[in-house]
Image (cartoon, coloured by chain):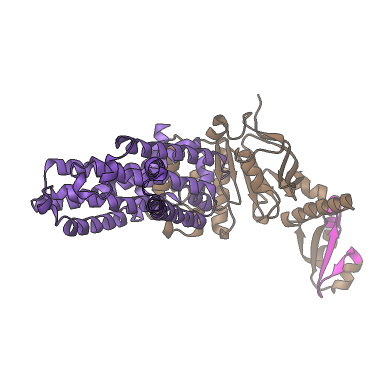
Chain colours: A purple, B brown
């Protein structure tokens, strides 16, 4: 069983390297993060927080946009693509089970993401350290950012698998993946903002809004990362929110895990109904 | 000892109220080479998917090595090559083969040897994207040969192959069955497998309309044998008068005769001795036999509906 999961994971990782997915992600992540580090860490001197910490705060927002996108793009092909190529027939005529297959894919894709994040964000961290902006807590902040980004990626990978197992056409799966990104990353926050503006003191702001943030892994991710930074009061627009939440920030982290777990189980259940 | 490798019993499969497969019953013994013939949409691929456990028959049952299709036992000894399979273009042949070997729990290094058997030893290090259609198909076959499958299901394995690759392909099939595996292959490219299969199943509109050796099917179809006799000097009309049959050009006569009359007719021809320059015997081809059986089934169908 582990052998087969590992085999699928290795193959996904190899494909990721081969078709330059990893390279592309690394280039995008490092380009954006270096730009943010160079431009966005300017106020560090006046605020008396380390440049690394303040950069991690900007990068958390970057992750919210890029990591779900990369994850969805990695995942949409997982089932529909194998159906279209006819390889799913081969795979499931071997002793491999459906859950082994999807878990293997997820492990491989998470490794792809982790490598891209480590290289992309790591290069920025090293650059900051080399220019004298590094300290131990800054490196810890970076490590936390990379690890939580991978968890966020897992949540969106699972959503991508759901889409991929629901439709048989790769192009439809791709379109739906982009749609999910648009709704959860862009429109969701806009809607929350709108509702908050309309009802800034009432029931929504106090009782619905915090849980609406928890329900979306992207918002939960931002919430956790910003509140985890020591300097949150100074760097995060959402930091104020973190303090007035009716739950500790670690609940946000847990909620990403729960989201990913539920979505992944859903994807496996859907895959079990797929006739390759 | 029970050596039935695949058994289908009154299998019926319905999609949206339409029967894709109905009343399908047959058995495959060990080390048999069997061809499953039928038009597009005759139900061949549906049958393969049922044999692999991807589809559950609406009625009836299929057994693979006395086990449920898709069960661990059945999957462990079944190999399959789908009709059209496109391996990851960015991976090499060796990487693809190792992957499937590991999924099947077989020795990946040993599987690499299969590339040589299908003539891809050198191409194995190249990416699949650079392969020709024949090479991709052979890679697919190599994949199906990993381990020691007892049942090898090949869905249209020779479609799109040139005659030489096709010959090589059937050589491999013979080799596989020589090693004790039962091979069931579907096709609508018919003639090239005459000498290559032990038994032929013909499906038409989801029904099994024939199940026998080619020789028996030929006899059962009672298709005429065509003798083409060429005279040395005599005009064809004269030859036709003596032998029966119809002149086809100035020196040749075509005679249609039933299977059991063949020897007598040939004897009649040879008794003319010096008059005859040449004689060709055309047995009905597999295409003719196939056409006969699928058309017969069509006729019975429309008679039943009328």
In the picture, residue B58 is in which quadrant? top right
Q: Which residues are magenta?
A: B242-268
Along the viewing direction, whichever of A98 and B105 lies nearer the viewer? A98
Residue B113 visible from this viewpoint: no
Q: Position of residue B41 (x, y in %)?
A: 69, 53
In the picture, residue B295 is in which quadrant? bottom right
List the single residue furthest toward the left.
A132
Residue under the point 28% across and 58% down: A28
Q: Is residue B241 above or below residue A190?
A: below
Along the viewing direction, whichever of A139 and B58 lies nearer the viewer? A139
Relative placement, left or right, of B203 versus B160 is right
Residue under the point 40% across and 32% down: A2
Residue B254 painted magenta: yes
In the rendered view of the protein, which quadrant contains the N terminus of chain B?
A: top right
In the picture, residue A207 is in which quadrant? top left
Relative placement, left or right, of A135 versus B176 is left
Residue under the point 65% across and 38% down: B56
Residue B100 visible from this viewpoint: yes
Q: Position of residue A125 (x, y in %)?
A: 17, 49
What number of labels is visible?
0
Q: Position of residue B153 (x, y in %)?
A: 59, 43
Residue B199 painted magenta: no
List the single residue furthest toward the right.
B241
Relative placement, left or right, of A173 versus B31 is left
Q: Position of residue A98 (x, y in %)?
A: 50, 38
Along the viewing direction, whichever of B191 and B19 lies nearer the viewer? B19
């Amino acid at each position: 069983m582990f052998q087969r999961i590992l085999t699928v994971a290795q193959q996904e990782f190899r494909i990721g390297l081969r078709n330059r997915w990893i390279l592309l992600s690394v280039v995008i992540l490092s380009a954006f993060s270096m730009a943010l580090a160079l431009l966005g860490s300017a106020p560090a001197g006046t605020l008396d927080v380390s440049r690394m910490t303040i950069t991690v705060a900007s990068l958390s927002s970057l992750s919210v946009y890029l990591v779900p996108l990369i994850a969805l793009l990695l995942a949409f092909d997982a089932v529909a693509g194998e159906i279209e190529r006819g390889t799913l027939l081969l795979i499931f005529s071997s002793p491999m089970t459906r859950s082994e297959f999807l878990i293997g894919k997820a492990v491989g894709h998470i490794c792809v993401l982790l490598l891209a994040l480590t290289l992309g964000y790591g290069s920025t961290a090293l650059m900051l350290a080399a220019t004298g902006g590094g300290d131990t807590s800054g490196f810890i902040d970076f490590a936390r950012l990379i690890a939580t980004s991978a968890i966020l990626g897992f949540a969106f990978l699972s959503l991508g698998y759901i889409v991929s197992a629901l439709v048989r056409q790769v192009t439809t799966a791709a379109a739906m993946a982009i749609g999910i990104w648009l709704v959860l990353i862009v429109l969701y926050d806009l809607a929350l903002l709108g509702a908050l503006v309309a009802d800034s003191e009432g029931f929504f702001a106090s009782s619905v809004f915090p849980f609406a943030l928890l329900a979306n892994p992207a918002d939960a991710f931002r919430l956790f990362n910003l509140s985890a930074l020591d300097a949150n009061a100074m760097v995060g627009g959402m930091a104020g929110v973190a303090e007035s939440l009716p739950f500790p920030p670690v609940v946000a982290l847990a909620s990403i895990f729960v989201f990913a777990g539920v979505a992944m189980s859903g994807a496996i259940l859907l895959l079990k109904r797929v006739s390759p | 000892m029970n050596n039935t490798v695949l058994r289908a019993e009154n299998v019926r499969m319905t999609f949206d109220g339409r029967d894709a497969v109905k009343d399908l019953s047959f058995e495959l013994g060990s080390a048999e080479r069997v061809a499953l013939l039928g038009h597009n949409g005759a139900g061949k691929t549906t049958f393969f998917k049922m044999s692999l456990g991807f589809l559950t028959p609406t009625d009836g049952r299929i057994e693979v090595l006395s086990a449920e299709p898709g069960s661990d036992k059945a999957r462990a000894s079944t190999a399959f090559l789908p009709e059209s399979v496109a391996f990851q273009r960015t991976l090499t042949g060796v990487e693809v083969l190792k992957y499937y070997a590991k999924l099947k729990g077989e020795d990946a290094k040993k599987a690499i040897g299969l590339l040589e058997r299908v003539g891809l030893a050198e191409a194995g290090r190249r990416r699949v994207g650079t392969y020709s259609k024949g090479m991709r198909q052979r890679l697919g076959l190599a994949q199906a040969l990993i381990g020691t499958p007892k049942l090898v299901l090949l869905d249209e394995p020779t479609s799109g192959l040139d005659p030489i690759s096709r010959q090589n392909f059937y050589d491999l099939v013979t080799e596989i069955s020589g090693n004790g595996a039962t091979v069931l292959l579907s096709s609508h490219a018919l003639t090239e497998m005459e000498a290559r299969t032990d038994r032929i199943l013909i499906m038409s509109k989801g029904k099994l309309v024939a199940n026998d050796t080619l020789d028996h099917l030929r006899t059962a179809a009672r298709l005429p044998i065509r003798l083409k006799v060429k005279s040395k000097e005599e005009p064809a009309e004269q030859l036709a008068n003596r032998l029966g049959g119809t002149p086809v050009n100035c020196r040749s006569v075509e005679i249609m005769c039933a299977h059991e009359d063949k020897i007598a007719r040939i004897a009649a021809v040879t008794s003319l001795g010096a008059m005859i320059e040449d004689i060709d015997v055309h047995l009905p081809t597999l295409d003719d036999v196939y056409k006969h059986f699928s058309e017969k089934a069509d006729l019975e169908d429309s008679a039943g509906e009328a």
